Image (cartoon, rainbow, N blue to C red):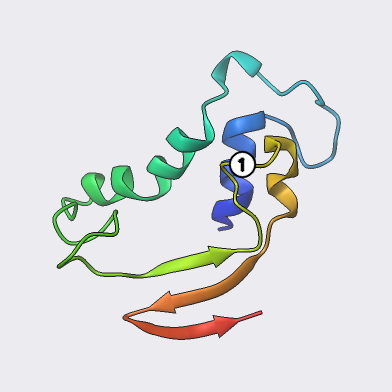
Amino acid sequence: MDPVAGIYAAVTRRTLDGKNPDGWLPEQKITVEDAIKCYTINSAYAAFEENIKGSIEPGKLADFVVLTEDILAIDPVEIINVKVDRTIFDGEMIYQR
């Protein structure tokens, strides 16, 4: 499962083969902010864990990734090209590109 690809798909509704450049069912596009929430706080809520994860706050688990681009600032079509630069798990860097 690739969350970056999932965010790209939710925001652009494009297929990876390029056959739907305007998006498949474009009326179902959501914002980048909403797509991020689906992968973070909304997923934690669905698991009844919103008090311990899903957002970066004091007292919560701090597992997160650092991306090569700010997906809130770039053209959503470019999100598919963004890579994970680092992964922090349980307070320790476990991956660095």
Front residue of this view, candidates 27 and 66: 66
Q: Residue at x 68, y 46 (%)?
A: 79
Q: Is residue 94 left or right of residue 15?
A: left
Q: Quadrant of residue 61?
A: bottom left
Q: Is residue 1 left or right of residue 61?
A: right
Specify the quadrant of the image occupied by residue 90.
bottom left
- Quadrant containing the N terminus in the rendered view: bottom right
The vertical placement of 27 against 84, above or below, is above
In the image, residue 14 lies at what x, y percent? 73, 31
Taking the view exactly as shown, the residue that stands out farthest to the front is 73
Residue position marked by numbered label 1 in the rendering:
73
Q: Quadrant of residue 28?
A: top right
**45 in relation to 97, above or below:** above
- Amino acid carrying label 1: it is Ala
Provide residue 46's location: percent of width, then percent of height.
24, 45
Above-or-below relation of 89 to 45: below
Q: Position of residue 44 (x, y in %)?
A: 26, 51
Mark 1 crowd level (few <14, some 14–19, many ≥20, 10 Å Cα): few
Would you say 90 lies left or right of 67 here?
left
